[in-house]
Amino acid sequence: MAWKMIYLARRNPALAPEDFPQAWREHSALGAGCTNVRDKVKSVRQCSRDLENTPRLPGATADYDGVNLLVLRDRQAADDIWSDEETLRIMRPDEPRVFSTYVRNFTLVAEEAVLREGEPTDCMVVAFLGLREGTAPDALARALAEADAARWLADPAFGAALRLVLNRVEGTPPPGYDYALILEAWYPGPADAVRAFDATPLPARLPRAVADCIDPARSVTLLTRVTHRRP
């Protein structure tokens, strides 16, 4: 298991969608120069929305522009990084150039559980899953305990993934980002992802016990390509 910070980002509207990945890479380069970021963040994968294939993936949205997966040294790093003097001085002033708001406003902290081991590729389908209204946290915990890896992989789309990861969100999410789970499904390429999902959106493919807790209308699915990674 690992702790992560996970972004669900919108670009600055002044940037064209095709220009967003490069602006984001430039921003990441600032982080690579910050001592505490290098110490606290073990790896970075910036996953920009696939502009060519998104309409073909059932249920995929074009309302967001990217997802960042940052594997952390430990849970405490997720809190410490927001008050780091170097990060505030170097990275935060650049955030409005790249994103629609400051990064803290769209970042979630989550604990990772790997359902299928495998190296991340350059294509990820990712879903931010919101709970049905009135669902108690302990109901979700029971559902996750019931749904072992075999039940997730029994679905053909998830079974076709080279790597499958479930991230359980911890703490209080930022306003507008009230998600309980974040699912990563990694494929050889976008065409493989589209073919795996066929005509059925991701929330409809969840194990039954988990699906009963999730509201598809409060969930977001993206088809992404890795446009920057470190290391």
Image (tube, rainbow, N blue to C red):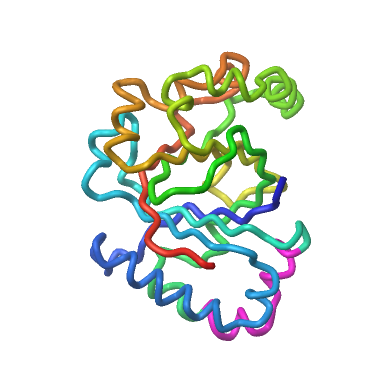
Along the viewing direction, whichever of 103 and 29 lies nearer the viewer: 29
Along the viewing direction, whichever of 67 and 188 lies nearer the viewer: 188
> Of all residues shown, which one is farthest toward the front?
118
Give the residue drawn at x 56%, y 83%.
33
Residue 83 to residue 2: above or below: below
Q: Does the magenta run of residues contain 47? A: no
Instruction: Indicate the quadrant where residue 17 lies.
Output: bottom left
**Residue 52 image position (x, y, % from top left):** 21, 47
> Of all residues shown, which one is farthest toward the top?
208
Residue 16 lies left or right of residue 133; in this view the side is left
Residue 88 to residue 184: above or below: below
Along the viewing direction, whichever of 101 and 122 lies nearer the viewer: 122
Residue 178 lies left or right of residue 120; in this view the side is right
Residue 183 to residue 5: above or below: above
Give the residue drawn at x 68%, y 83%.
85
Q: How many marks?
A: 0
Q: Quadrant of the N terminus?
A: top right
**Residue 104 image position (x, y, % from top left):** 58, 63
Q: Main secondary structure of the magenta part?
A: helix
Instruction: Indicate the quadrant where residue 107 lies.
Output: bottom right
Instruction: Indicate the quadrant where residue 148 lies.
Output: top right
Q: Quadrant of the C terminus?
A: bottom right
Residue 63 lies left or right of residue 94; in this view the side is left
Give the residue drawn at x 63%, y 58%.
71
Give the residue drawn at x 58%, y 42%.
178
The residue range painted magenta reads 77-92
